[in-house]
Each structure stands twice: as C-alpha cells, then as structure tokens.
Amino acid sequence: MEKNLRQQKTAIIKIALFGPESTGKTTLAKQLADYYETEWVPEFARDYLQEKWEENQHICVADDMLPIAYGQVALENKKLASAKKYLFSDTNLMVTKVFSEMYYGFCDPLLNEAALEHDYDLFFLTDIDVPWEKDDIRDTPDGRESVFSVFKQTLIDTKKPFITLSGNKESRLAKATAIIDALSMAKQHGFSSADFVQIYNHGISFDKILKQLEIFKNGILKSNLISPATINNGILSLSEAEFEERAHFFDLQKEKLKLKKFVPASGAASRMFKFLSAFLNDFDIKKETINAYINRKKDSDLSIFIVAMDKFPFFKSVDQKLKEVYPDFETLDRDYKNYYFVKILLDPDYFDFANKPKAVLPFHQYKTHIANPIEEHLNECVHYASSNQVSNLHFTVSEIHQNLFENEVEVLKEKVEADSGVEIAISYSYQNKSTDSICVDAKNIPIRDKNNNLVFRPGGHGALIENLKELDSDVIFIKNIDNVIQNHIDTIALYKKALAGVLIKVQQKVFGYLNAIEQKEIKEENIEEMVAFLMQKLNIELSSDFNKFTFENKVNKIKELLDRPIRVCGMVKNEGEPGGGPFWVRNDKGAVSLQIVETSQVDLANKKQTEILAEATHFNPVDLVCGIKNYKNEKFDLLQFVDQKAGFIVEKSVDGKIVKSYELPGLWNGAMANWLTIFVAVPLITFNPVKTVNDLLKAAHQPQ
C-alpha cells in the first residue's frame, strides 16, 4: 500500500461518520469535537471539488478518487497528532470507496485495499431522516433510500462495527455521546468494538454488563431466613364459607374493574421431555435393551413413561403415526416399538414436542376431544377473569412460537366464547432481550460462540416484571401455563375469585388511608388503627423507634409503607415438590418482611438456615392476584419495587460446556419483594404443574 494511504497507529478512540451526502455528518463531527474538546477531521473532498468547480465548473470524475483519498488520509493523520482521547472523522476512505463504486462502477485497488484496512473504533451510520440541503457539489435528493441501503450494506459486508444514528441534531448528539462514553468504558474492560456493538444491539446497557460481571465475581447475597411463614404466622387461613364470601364480594365488585389474566408461557418444553431426550442420546438399541438402560441409568422416569404410555393424551396420535411411518410396526419387538415411540414423539420431522411450547401440547383427554393448556386457560379466564361479558388474557411468548399460539387460539377461542357468552380479548408480549444475561466460564470470563460472538441467555421469568408493568388493569390474575387441571373448573374459579376478593378488600382499605393522608384528614388517634392494620393485615413490622417519630414523620412512614403494589398469593402445603416457599426474611437493612424464597437463595452451608428451610410447611405460590395501580388510579413503576440483590447465578450447558449465567430476581421472588404481600392457604387441587411429561399421569390430568 502507498505510504500516504496508511493510517498512523494510535491509542486515540477514532469514530467515523458514515453515510450518504446531506445526512448531518459534518454537523455531528463538529458537535462531538466541541463536546469532548478534541479534533475533528473535515471532508477533504469538499474543498478539493469546490475549488475544481470554481476554477472551470468541472465536476468530480473517477480520476479524482485517488487524490481525494490521499488528501483525506493526510488530513486525518494531521488531526490525530493534536487529538485528545477521541478523534471524529467527518468522512473516511470507506465513503470514498462507496461513491467510487456507485458513480463509476469501479474502485482503484489501492483505494479499496486502504478503505478495508483502515481501522475505526466505531462507525456512526447517519440516517436519511434529516432534510437534504443543496450545494454546488451535491448530487440529487432522489433515491436517498437506495443510497442509504448501499452504505449500510457496505458496513455489514466489510464487518465494520457500526450503530445507526437517527433524529434531529440534538437527539443525535445526546445518543452519540452516551454511546461513546459506554464504548470507552467497554474498551477499558477489554471488550472489542464488535463486542460493544453486539451488546448495544441486544439492548443491554454496558453498565448492566459490568454489574452482571461483578455479580459473577462476588456471588449473590443469600437470604437471611428468620422463620418459615406458617398458618396464622404470615399465612392467612380461610374456611370454605370465608372463601365463598370473598368470591361473592369479588363478583359484586368486578363490573367496575378492568380484569386481566397474565400467563407466563415463554420457552419450549425441553425440560418436560429432558429424560426422554437423554434416553435418545445415550441409548443404542442394537447394543442393549431398554430395561438394561433403565437399570444402568437408574432411570425410573423412563420406566414409568413406558409402563403408562397408553394413558398419555397423545398416545393414539403417536401410535397412528408410527403405523404410517413403519408399515411393519405391529410385528416389531416391544423394545423397538417403545424406542420408536419416543423417537417420533421428539423428532423435529414429526411431533417435535421438546421444541414446542407447553401451551400447545396435548394435556387432557376429554370424551369429545383433547385439550391443550391454551384451551384450559381460555376456559378458566371466562370463569373468573371476566367483567361486563369481556375477558382479557395475556400470554408472554417466545417470538418464534407466537404463530403456534395464534393458530391454536383461532381454533379454540370461538368455541369457548360461544359456550360462555363471554368475548375474549387476547394479547401477547415477548421477554425483552435487554433483560438477558451475558454468559461466563468458571473464571468469570465471557464465553464466545463459534463465530466469536458473545453468548447471552434469557434473564429468567423475573424479566417478565417488565411485561407485567405494561398492562393496564385493576386486577391481574397470574398463573403459569402448565398449572391447569382437567375438570373441577368451578372449584378452581372459586379460589381464584376469593383471592381477588381478599385483594380488593385490602386495596380499598389501603386506598382509603392514603386518600385520607393526602387530604390531611389523619389525626393522632388514627395512627394506632393504621399501625394495627399494617401489622395484622399486611404483616409489616415497624422499626423499634417508630413511636419516637413526630406525628408528621409517622404519617410519612405509613404512607411510604402503604403506597405500593399489592399481591395476594395462594399457597399450598409442600408435599415434596422442588422449589422454595414463604418465609419471614430480614434484609440487609434489618427490616423483616414476608418473602417467597427459592432454595438456591439459601446458604445451605449454614446449619441454622437449612433447619429453617426444612421447617417450611408451604410451597411457592400457585396463584397470584395483583393490584398494580395506586390510590390515584395510576400505574406503579413496578421496577422500583424489585430487590435487585435477589437474583440467581445458574449453571447451564452451551455447546456441551458448562457456563454461568445471571437470572433476574424471580417474578414472585425478588421482583415483587417490596410489594404489599398477603399469603392465603389454598387447597392442593389448585396446584397441578406439569414439570415433566410424567406429571400428566397424575389424577388431576387424567379423565374422571
């Protein structure tokens, strides 16, 4: 390469402005140089071509491309000598290369080679959303979209790190400076420009990445359990008559309320069929029998699956397909029949159950048809989440699965509406990619895939607090996609409505107090009543020095404690299911509150903590009913009530390697840690999760 087309080496961070003519490159380069008190590199071609025009009205020709390139490089190297930390280039050889190819169908090899080799820490691709301004050397405003697409494709094809800038000059400057500051921080921590752009395009702030890396390094603060929450010690116990009374109260109130059912339904059913996938990966039917495999692996799950195979709601469909695929199926050995059954069940060319969402899988065999969880949730929704003959149902889904949901809904919705006389409005949302976590190895170093890209994983169902906060409803029923039951829908509806009745009664009391505080109607004698309500109905412990507060400070403290979103959680007795439960917990500031705590949040090396964990009588909530609006009918910013220290570090397998990932505080764990919380004991009939396919063999999922 010619010496005068070489860039000088530097530690200065170089930002290139890149885009068609009249897209604000010069304006932004000047703004950035002023902002960071450094140099910017003007466009050499402008003066060169202006002078040529003024001398004899000659316009740019192909032979001008190389001189322009030489002049541009010389100007950049000159400015580099006096730059401070950053250098902003109004243009660069890549722009010259693009114009040469667009206008003359040719690029000089020297220019092409230099343009590809020139290095910038970041390209800002300037959008065409600003007005085109005419001057002597500009071409035409026509066809700006196609020209812009050529510029963008050039950056993609040459694998240059770029971010598109749109908006007016003020918003572009604000966006650009925020990006540059984050890029500088990323460079200091050893990330490349390509890494930074990948993180940016994922929607994750670099500051969040640093916090995640800090968590991997220092670990998660474990919960400080005080005691388990039990009946009459944090868990409200209601008689059947009281459940019916609360449900009736809800029915009287619901026509005035916006109701919605919120169903986390993201992700595939891979864990549901995990033991079957392991079987297919490790079993060789030519070398051993299935019974030998079961004994070798001590795989009781596979044994149960095979013995009870004909009781699954999908048995007949799979059996029929097997006979189509294998014409001699009936003559096969039993082991081959069972092996092919599992194989075709998971085969992507046939049923592909492990890669589909649980929502669309056959769960329940009725006399007339087979129902999936979507149908069961539609039926539940019209039973308890409807008012004024309208029911609202919201699914959080994976984007790749939304069509599957919509196809099922199209088939099922009309039937449920006709049977119930209730119109069902269905909406969807995705888990925000900005809540994903970077993955690291055992040494806390970010891992990369085969293309050298950073690897990210979803941040867990705690990320759905963002989806929840976007809903505009007075009462929201939350229930997992797999927690459905065959028959007994009226019984299920009773308990859900009762929980909503508990919520509304408490909410009315809370709103009454808060309105009285705002209207300055609270007197000294009201304080004792409000404190009793906080302690007895909301299980909130006040600090020991509360009685020393002035009247005004007491009122302010009560307002702070009451002005929060509310959750009422249905709790069932723990009968050995894995997971956490309800506990009294002391936080790092000494405050004691009711929390849902996962086993992974407990210090299992601490004997006292493990003893408290073992004393738990109840399981994680199976149903939640939430109020996410304040006493002024405004939506709370739910992110303000998350305990950010209550996340999880999890180990996952990526391309056969164990990696660490960070999961956000769980939806009903840390994500709701600072809500007003009421635990209500509910019967086991309300808890019927399908964590593995064998759970479909339980009585709740079998025909009556």
Image (tube, rainbow, N blue to C red):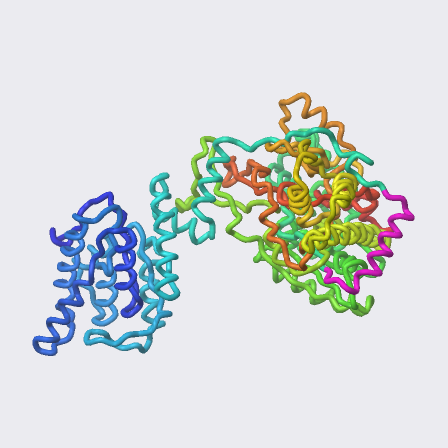
Residue positioned most to the right: 241
In the displayed structure, 246 sits above or below 143; it is: above
Position of residue 333 measured from the top left corner of the image (x, y, whole percent)? 72, 42
Residue 558 or residue 445, whichever sits in front:
558
- Does residue 175 appear in the picture of this structure? yes
Residue 375 or residue 642, whichever sits in front:
642
Residue positioned most to the left: 55
Q: How many marks?
A: 0
Position of residue 701 measured from the top left corner of the image (x, y, whole percent)? 80, 48
Within the magenta stretch, is there residue 52? no
In the displayed structure, 428 sits above or below 80; it is: below
Q: Residue at x 55, y 38 (%)?
A: 652
Main secondary structure type of the part rendered in magenta: helix
Residue positioned most to the top: 607
* For residue 461, side relative to residue 226 (left or right): left
Q: Residue at x 31, y 68 (%)?
A: 23
* For residue 201, side relative to residue 368 (left or right): left
Q: Quadrant of residue 684?
A: top right
Position of residue 85 measured from the top left corner of the image (x, y, whole percent)? 26, 46
Q: Residue at x 34, y 64 (%)?
A: 169
- Does residue 328 appear in the picture of this structure? no
> Range of the magenta residues?
238-259
Position of residue 509 measured from the top left corner of the image (x, y, whole percent)? 77, 51
